[in-house]
């Protein structure tokens, strides 16, 4: 044992109390558009928000489109909103919501 010293640096930047499930393979401090956000949009959003007939004329198919929608179209509010949920009538699981939140909080990594 001797002089081994353990210094535990905890750099917790999370402000929420709710931790993601232990078994989640996703490091929420390191989410990126390509790996995490894009598949979520593909699974939950672009069925309506893509192409010429995009709902509300809002497309969520590219990095820039999603980033812009967060800045200008209240995307974050809508994915958490009980009153005006996106997707309509059926909010995504909390983990998916968390991923988008952290992506924004951490600076929109591509
Ligand atoms: C079933 C079709 C459908 C799906 C799926 C869907 N949307 Fe929508 N979305 C709409 C419609 C229709 C509107 C316009 C009416 C409204 O605002 O509720 C809209 C509006 C929005 C707006 C508001 C735009 C503004 O300027 O006010 C945002 C943001 C949005 N959607 C994001 C999303 C996100 C993110 C997802 C996936 C998590 C998603 N939507 C999934 C149909 C859909």
Image: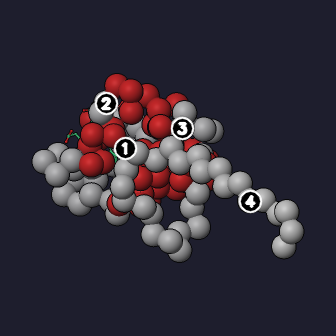
Local SS, label 1: loop
Ligand 1 contact, mark 2 (Cβ < 8 Å): yes
Task: Name the residue beneath numbered marker 1.
Answer: 49
Q: Is 86 located above or below residue 22 in the figure? A: above
Q: Looking at the image, which residue sits at the far front? A: 2
17 relative to 36 in the view: left or right: left
Instruction: Say how many tags the image has.
Output: 4
| Residue 93, quarter of the rendered image | bottom left
**Chain-order first, disc 4 or disc 2:** 4
Q: At which x and y percent is residue 41? A: 45, 51
**Chain-order first, disc 1 or disc 2:** 1
107 relative to 110 in the view: left or right: left
75 relative to 12 in the view: left or right: left
**Chain-order first, disc 1 or disc 3:** 1
Task: Name the residue beneath numbered marker 2.
Answer: 73
Please name the residue shown 27% across and 58% down the image.
Answer: 91
Please name the residue shown 47% across and 37% down the image.
Answer: 104
Which mark is on residue 6?
4
Q: Are marks 4 and 2 in contact (CB under 8 Å)?
A: no
Query: Which callout, 1 or 4, points to the residue nearer the camera?
Result: 4
């Amino acid at each position: 044992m001797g002089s081994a010293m353990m210094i535990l640096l905890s750099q917790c930047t999370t402000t929420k109390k709710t931790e993601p499930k232990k078994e989640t393979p996703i490091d929420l401090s390191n989410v990126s558009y390509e790996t995490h956000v894009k598949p979520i949009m593909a699974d939950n959003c672009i069925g309506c928000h893509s192409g010429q007939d995009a709902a509300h004329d809002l497309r969520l198919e590219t990095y820039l489109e999603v980033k812009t929608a967060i800045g200008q179209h209240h995307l974050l509010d809508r994915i958490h909103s009980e009153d005006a949920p996106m997707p309509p009538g059926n909010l995504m699981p909390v983990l998916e919501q968390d991923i988008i939140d952290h992506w924004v909080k951490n600076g929109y990594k591509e």
